[in-house]
Image (cartoon, rainbow, N blue to C red):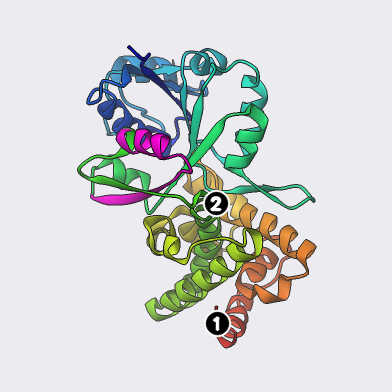
Amino acid sequence: MASLHKVCIVGSGNWGSAIARIVGSNVKKFEKFDNTVLMYVYEEMVNGRKLTEIINTEHENVKYLPGRRLPENIVADPDLKHAVQQSDLLVFVVPHQFVDGICNQIKGTLRENTHAISLIKGFDCRGKGIELISSAISNFLSIDVSVLMGANIASEVADENFCEATIGCLDETMGQTWQDLFTTRYFRTQVVNDPHTVELCGALKNIIAVASGFVMGICHSDNTRAAMIRLGLIEMIKFVNLFYGNSRLETFFESCGIADLITTCSMGRNQRVAEAFVTTGKSLAELEKEMLNGQFLQGPLTAMEANRFLEEKGQVKQFPIFTAVYDICYNGKPVTEMFDAMIEASAASKL
């Protein structure tokens, strides 16, 4: 009999905890999975108690997903190496700036035939082009890495509101395994053989969400937000084609594409913080600390990484919305430049 797949969730923020509710339930439905799911939790003190102790006794992540019960087979582990060494299916769900540190800690400790899936929305750019998070993990750890992206506000997933997600995976067998692990009656997944596009959509939509927040902070017009979503999607498609060159247009119409973009531009953290940046006059760093309860703002950082890539390619002027977000966040340009960028994008809004 084949050995059972053992799952470890690497990360325990609001999204990690929401997905843990699904994974903890699903592993008990299939004979292929071990019933215990480990969840790496960065140890913190909450009201004088260790967060791992609270999760393992009260079955609730009281800091990042309060009020939603975790399955009792979710076991919080503060020892990253111990958690991953026990597992052959790794679910990465941490802010993308922490990926290197985590991979450094676990390199050389994994089981043979370990597979991973990244739920991380972002990418890395260090002066030599962009590297996808899945590629960074795969190259660092020498393992296969798929991706899952979609219109998934963590609190709504935790409340079991109907939603969809897209799994990008090149291997049909692993695609089915990931689909079994994540699909429920309320959380529907589709597997596509276009993981690069799936992942890039998950990163780039955060830039457009920041842009949406900026314009909503100025005029609070649904018409303007709709225009931003349309123009932003066009820039996303152009960027993916510039970066990857082999994307499938239909992937942008999966949950990872237009659906995620609409949701993020309507109520995601990047949109909310960017709007507050306009209305309060506070810095993005201040608002991140005040509004996100220890979570991180991804849009500005992704805009910076995208801008570096576009500079290298000599394509900055072809992406006015991406560029405006970068200039407002990092170069002190006025938020009103967002409207100039929209006018410029609208004049050239053909694929």
Badge 2 marks a residue whose secondary structure is: helix
Kind of residue sitting beneath label 2: His
User: Quarter of the image holding residue 134?
Assistant: top right
Q: Which residue is mark 2?
A: 196
The reply, left or right, for residue 151 in relation to residue 283 is left
Residue 148 placement (x, y as % from top left): 43, 44
- Above or below 259: residue 169: above
Kind of residue sitting beneath label 1: Ser
Would residue 44 be seen by someone viewing this image from the given angle?
Answer: yes
Q: Which mark is residue 236?
A: none
- Above or below 54: residue 209: below
Residue at 27% from the left image edge and 29% from the top image edge: 26
Sequence order check: which comes first, mark 1 or mark 2?
2
Q: Check disc 2: other Cα within 10 Å, few if <14, some if 14-19, many if 20+.
A: many
Badge 1 marks a residue whose secondary structure is: loop
Which residues make up the magenta segment? 162-180
Q: Which residue is mark 1?
A: 349
